[in-house]
Amino acid sequence: MPARRARAAAVVVVLLAPAAGCADPNSTPQASPPAPATPSGLTLVFSDEFETAGSLDPARWAYEVGYVRNDEKQYYTSRPENVRAEGGSLVIEGRKEAYQGFAYTSASVHTLGRFEFLYGRVEVRAKLPSGRGAWPAIWMLGVNLPQVGWPACGEIDIMENVGFDPLRIHASVHTAAYNHTIGTQKTASVTVASPADDFHVYSLDWYPDRIEIAVDGRGYFTFRNEGTGSRTWPFDKPHHLLVNLAIGGAWGGQQGIDDALFPKRYLVDYVRVYRRD
């Protein structure tokens, strides 16, 4: 599975306590359900419900801009045409348009320099774009990427989907010892009903001894700390979140890009991060 690389930015670290153990572009985003009571043993430390229309909160989110990785065909922007809060959701919109020498535009938002964390629970409720060429993701990178590079920094893919296989959701980790460039990546997938028509909750539970990933509470991927050092477990250092919609690329573009489906909208109802008490 193609790796991800993020641009460097200032780092502000929030350490969390270790654990004890394609949608219709004209459709109206579904409103968030009422915020549930925080589950026992957890404390909400970061959230965005995207209730204020317009630009994203700069205290929470930054943007990747330009061409970044993976032979993807889009130019990432921070323009409202590509990324905004609308109708109670984050909207990331992939567009077919000539811009800065590229044929497509989209957006990638991240929390580097705003919020980083170590261990805890992540929940993202999202509706995915469909169609050949769409490649939405929810993922994490170690904040020490500028110092040690990829994959030594560690990467956790909470959700990846490619539009040519629209019902399959993938979870993965990448480390120095386990990554796709040497054929050792750790990954799993699960079939989900209507991810382009309905919102689903994509979640990560990150402990000192393991990583567990689920959809709607249905766990399907576990990666355990082997206790052999940072080549296999770089996940003892803070990471930050990324949410992006790629167009084409080394994986997402393997069966081409269906231009008839643009604009493609990726809707995120909320992002919530908890620490374990």
Image (tube, grey):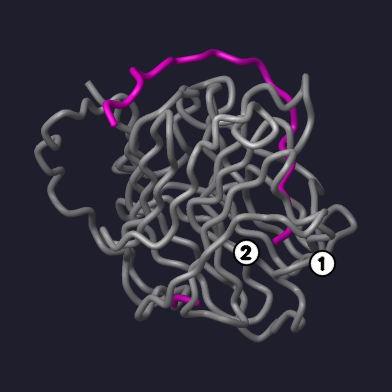
Per the image, label 2 sits on a secondary structure element best described as strand
Residue 202 sits above or below residue 5 on the image:
below
Left or right: where does residue 72 sit relative to residue 268?
Answer: right
Q: Is residue 19 magenta?
A: yes
Label 2 to label 1, Cα distance in Å? Answer: 11 Å
Q: Amino acid at mark 1?
A: Ala
Question: At x 53% / y 30%, what residue is drawn?
Answer: 111
Question: At x 57% / y 41%, what residue is drawn?
Answer: 109
Left or right: where does residue 205 sit relative to residue 62?
Answer: left
Residue 52 sits above or below residue 160 on the image:
above
Q: Amino acid at mark 2?
A: Gly
Q: Main secondary structure of the magenta part?
A: loop
Left or right: where does residue 120 sit relative to residue 77?
Answer: left
Judged from this view, the residue extending furthest toward the right is 101
Question: At x 11% / y 33%, what residue is drawn?
Answer: 40
Q: Quadrant of the C terminus?
A: top left
- Residue neighbourhood size for the residue with mark 2, other residues' Cα within 10 Å, grouped as few (<14), some (14–19), many (≥20): many
Whichever of callouts 2 and 1 sits on the residue coming sooner in the sequence is: 2
Circle 2 residue: 94
- Foreground: 191 or 8? 191
In which image quadrant can residue 199 be found? bottom left
In which image quadrant can residue 248 be found? bottom right
Residue 44 sits above or below residue 186 on the image:
above
Left or right: where does residue 29 sit relative to residue 55?
Answer: left
Give the residues in magenta. Answer: 1-23
In the drawing, what numbered circle is on residue 103?
1
Q: Tell me where residue 6 appears, x and y as whole percent.
A: 71, 37
Q: Is residue 17 magenta?
A: yes
